[in-house]
Image: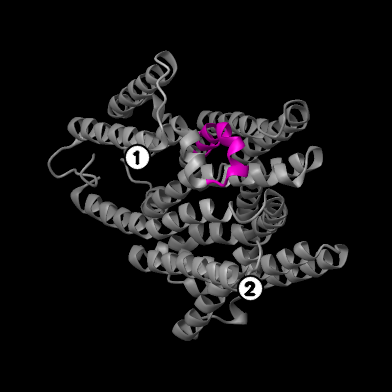
Amino acid sequence: MNDIENRKFHKDLFWYLLGSIIPSLLSFIRNPIFTRIFTPEEYGYYSIVVHTFGFISIVLFSWLGSCLWRYYFGYRKKNELNILYTNIISLLLISSIIVIILMCFWLSRTDNILIKRLVLLSTLYQLSYNFIYLYLITIRLKEKSFLFNLYYSIQAAGAFGILCLFVFILEYRIEAILIGQVAINILLLLFLTIKIRKIPGLSIKRISLPLIKELLKYGSVGLILGFGVMALNTSDRYVIALYTDMGSVGIYNQIYMLSQFSIYHLITVYFNTINPGLNKILVYNPEDKEFKIIEYIRHFLILLMPLVVYLSLFCKEVSIILLGEKFRVGYLMIPYIMFSSFIYGITLFNETKLKFENRFKPVIFGIIAALALNLLLNFILIPLFGYQWAAITTFISYMVLFLFFYLSDSLKYFTSTYLLKKIYPAVLILATQVIIDLIIRKVFNIKINVLMTIFEGVLFLLVYILVIKKRNIKPGNKFLGIF
């Protein structure tokens, strides 16, 4: 990166990190509080309904976002964004009607009052969220990182405040989680409606069947990929429900959400930062494309590796701090889930590049192969050894997905001498710290409480930062004072 790109990258990353602080803090506050209030069974029903609507969202909505990411710069270059917006909004309205029909069908098929409430609220959440979701993508594409994170933080803080009101004052149960999210989304939609009023250039006359076909063709790849990733993340809940009970589903879901959120949230922050720049690189195809992508990968590895290692190493203490007592039995699943999310983050580099090169076959075959393996292992291992094995099968499946994408892509970044030289100190210091902790706890059998574990983790992190800073810092090429 040159100096201008470096400064822009650091500025955007700063805003995305700052914007992630509020949602992260609220999530870490919410987990220990509400896993002590709501039962595993309630979380079981909640996870099944919410994840089912997650699948519906992937099929009907999320691929529209991927189309906006893919075609925005091309249509802006031709000064035809109004045509792109018209067709995407038209498809969004059609999808919304289908969601309402599906909601009515589900409500007519169940007598469980909790499920009815969750279904109705999940529908309202999907309808309100996806309009905001597409608007926020346009903000990110325009590289307005401050404005994006302002909306994101307001959304998280507002939902949490309304949740607390409905639980502690009005004495609602687990449906209050969705009530908070729906209420803040509606308020944001009203604000955006007043602010935007009308998108210039939108007209029914601009609806183009050839463009819709093109969007559907590209979006179908995003749909299959998104559906496959969603299934990798959530299909195990349905298998667990089939062979065990809703309590086990609830425990597994909260362990999974805690573990995944810790890593996946920062992965999202990172890709929010780099996506505009990465997309420009892939669209305009500069001569130094591969080196720029390797630079993004280097930053990703050095930033995320310590978090994955430390939270996995201290998984028992993490569960004690962040989960209610009934949910802590699954703490040994945390490392597998965290490393699964980390591996998927690396996979996103290959996935994005393959999709921009219109190499859809390896993308589709890779996700289908990983999902088929995951389902097969789940149906074999969960009945034999219990629901905890779902975390292991997910890890194995993500490894297969990564290998498939990596071997299908022309960019073999792990053969780059430059990248290996840069990440070698990070890997060495983390491996040394893991060995030190195991010697203390296992060999010398020293009991370390939660407070001392926090001190150990902070000390490890400070050592890591000092070592990486000393090895990588160069004048004019600082990365948040670390790289």
Quarter of the image that includes the C terminus: top left
Extreme-left residue of the structure: 475
Picture residue at 77% right of the left edge, 66% below the top: 116
Picture residue at 73% right of the left edge, 67% below the top: 117
In this rendered view, identify the residue nearer to me: 68 or 162.
162
x, y percentage for residue 70?
50, 56
Residue highlighted by disc 1: 303
Residue highlighted by disc 2: 90
On the rendered structure, is 349 left or right of 377?
A: left
The magenta region covers 323-341
Q: Is residue 305 magenta?
A: no
Q: Is residue 326 magenta?
A: yes
Observer able to see residue 357: no
Quarter of the image that includes the N terminus: top left
The amino acid at mark 2 is Ser
Observer able to see residue 65: yes
x, y percentage for residue 61?
63, 62
Near mark 2 (Cα within 10 A), the count class, few <14, some 14-19 or many ≥20, is: few
Picture residue at 58% right of the left edge, 77% below the top: 206
Q: Is residue 184 above or below residue 45?
A: below
Badge 2 marks a residue whose secondary structure is helix
Give me the disc on residue 42: none
